[in-house]
Image (spheres, helix red, strand yellow):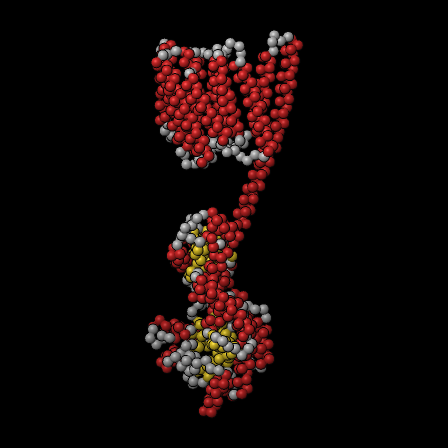
Amino acid sequence: MRRPDPILLVLAACTTASVAWFGLGDEHARLLTVWPLRVACDLAFVVLTRRVAGMAVLGPATRRFWWSLSSAGLLFGVGDAYQAVQMVRAPSATLLDGTQVQWALILTGMAQVVLTMLRHPSPKRTFGEWLRFGLDAAGFLMAGGLLVWSLASLPGVLDEEDVLSVAGAGALLLVAAFATVKLILSGNAPISRVAAVPGLLAAGLAFTTLVLDILERSPGTSAAGMALCVGPAVLMAFVPRVQELQLRADASAVSRPYFGQSLIPLTGCATVLVQASMALPRPTLRDLVLVLGVVAVSVVMVTRQELNTRDNIGVIKRLDTTLLELRGRERDLQQQAARDPLTGLFNRAGFAAEAQRVLADEAHDRGCALMLIDLDDFKTVNDTRGHPFGDALLASVAERLRRTVRPLDLVARLGGDEFAILACDLTAEAADALAERLLVELTVPLAVDGHALVVRASVGVAHGTPEAGMDEMIRDADIAMYAAKDRGKGTFRRYHPEMGEQLVERAHLGAELEKAIGTDQIRLLYQPIVDLVTGRMTGVEALTRWHHPERGPVSPAEFIPIAEYTGLIVPLGRWILAEACRQAAAWRDAFDEAADLVVNVNVAGRQLMEPGFVDEVAGVLRRTGLPARQLTVEVTETAVLRGEVTDVLQRLRDLGVGLALDDFGTAASSLGLLLTCPVSVLKLDRSFVEGVTTADRQSAVATAVIQMAAALKLRAVAEGIETVEQASYLRRLGYRYGQGFLFARPLPVDEVAGWFRETEARV
């Protein structure tokens, strides 16, 4: 329940006491009652207007309006206080009409109120609207001014010294009333229509008092006289209080445009017609009929015009309703165009527009950070679990990102599994901390369709000033993100200029790699795969080497990722496959020991997805004469997890080509893969071989792999064997085949041929 306003309680108490004193006292007591009560009302008006001006919901222009009203109220209060002092000194009924000092203060205050209302910003108007406003003002003020002049100029009514003050007060009252009406009907009023009603009533009472004084019909010290004298001040005290209550209930309590403005000039016309009829000296019946006819025709025309106006208002209201609906739909469409329907985040277009606004409108002393987030191996999840599962995962990741960042940070899904975050007003170190926190949050298992899934992501961070521009920040963050992927995924990198240089270097290296494919710069080395029991070479793995004419040897760890990123892995892989099969066929023809030699060729996932890859393999085998059983295609678990390559792998097996699962045990795969993928060989990753003789966990993994291979009738090959102890231990576990530096490093063609010669010589 709202507590009563203490100011209004005090004012009510003063009013009650004044009314009681007025009713019980004599004429002298009545004279002493009026002005103190007006002073109390003036003070209440000042305090309440200041309270409204201090409300936080108001704009600067509206605040200035209410502060100006408060200043005008002070002038009213000073004038009324002066009059109260004069009444106490020499009580007289003539003092009820005021003195020149009081009139000067009141006129000054009224002028300030009028200027405040006229200076308040109004909605932009066209030339036609300004013309209509000017005509309304001229008609209303001319009619009202004519009324004041006609009354003030009656012979013997006012002294010459009073004519100016009375005429000025009347003119100001008319201007104030007109300004108030136009202001509250304009749609940009600093005062609500309801709050303006007491003010208009106060102006009406004041004008009535002025007219009665001119006509020498003032009620004097009667109850009506007190009401006319004190009423305007009491009503004005309610104006700010009503406005305050409306603002507390609804912060947007302002007037809307109102089409009743058309009545303003009609009011002026009616006033002039009435004055004209009253001015006729001793009118005859004919004169009265003419006047009444003019009035009747005017009333009919005005009524007809008002009906037309109301019809137009109905049309305009319907148009307004339609426009509001269209604007609402436009907003919905704009929001749909700027939002990603799956996650509810900004999409690429919406993010770009919102980011430009943030960077342009706000000053960020500590800079801004743009983060690009790419989910690692998301395509694998999408392919193995299905698109609905992938969509649910993306929605969960989006929610996790939204909860991790600050409320003002922008989060977007740019497409696929790539997200972006724009965080402003933070240092580079704070940006790093935010990126680290994002990675930590993503490592917490996500519950997706009843499954707990750990997500890893690569994050690129670009930190700079808003002046750098959105395009530059996206480019830098993109470079940093790929640097994070090169580091090993599941991490973040912040952009620095050297990364740009590295990107240029990689692009240059990619261009040179494209030229090198098919030339003598690219050659193959072959690492033997041996029988751990007999030591006989049963196969070789073809390994690519690049000898640059200027740089010298380029590491595969450097150029293979570039080949995969640029797509050059497809022509490079095509050349490797053809060359390895040709060389294996040549050894097969030259050496009896190579009759059953199997050549292993690494194939990237990108190659498997190339249309016609199986036909390409079949064509190479046909041209080289190598039997399909002597070719084994090595693929990684990540490549096999792509759902669309399963059919390709099965068709390769149907050709008779072997399939080896390389680096087995290192990817986040399911054991069910061994049941769905038609592999024939498992290659135990070197990371499990390294400590197989010293670490129980690595030994356990090696044991589990050989047992699975035996159960599924797959051949197992241990990679990275470097010591006799490792070879012996793996042989005891059941491994029959292995490769590593213990047996041979990757060898050129002539050294492999030498191996065969030595073997045949021993035999």
Q: Is residue 501 left or right of residue 289?
A: left
Q: Residue at x 65, y 15 (%)?
A: 293
Q: Position of residue 230 (x, y in %)?
A: 42, 18
Q: Is 674 on the left-hand or right-hand side of 726? A: right
The quadrant of the rendering that contains the N terminus is top left
- Give the camera-side residue of 706 and 462: 462
Task: Depth check: give the residue in front, 219 or 484.
Answer: 219
Left or right of 684, for residue 353 = right
Task: Using the image as rendered, state which of residue 366 and residue 662 is in the foreground.
Answer: 366
What x and y, as percent, mark residue 22? Answer: 37, 13
Which residue lies at the image location 43% right of the left edge and 14% below the top edge?
97
Quarter residue 138 falls in:
top right
Residue plotted at (54% across, 48% down): 336
Does residue 390 lie above or below 290 as drawn? below
Q: Position of residue 621 (x, y in %)?
A: 57, 78
Query: In the image, residue 338 lies at what x, y percent?
Result: 52, 50
Residue 381 visible in the current orientation:
no
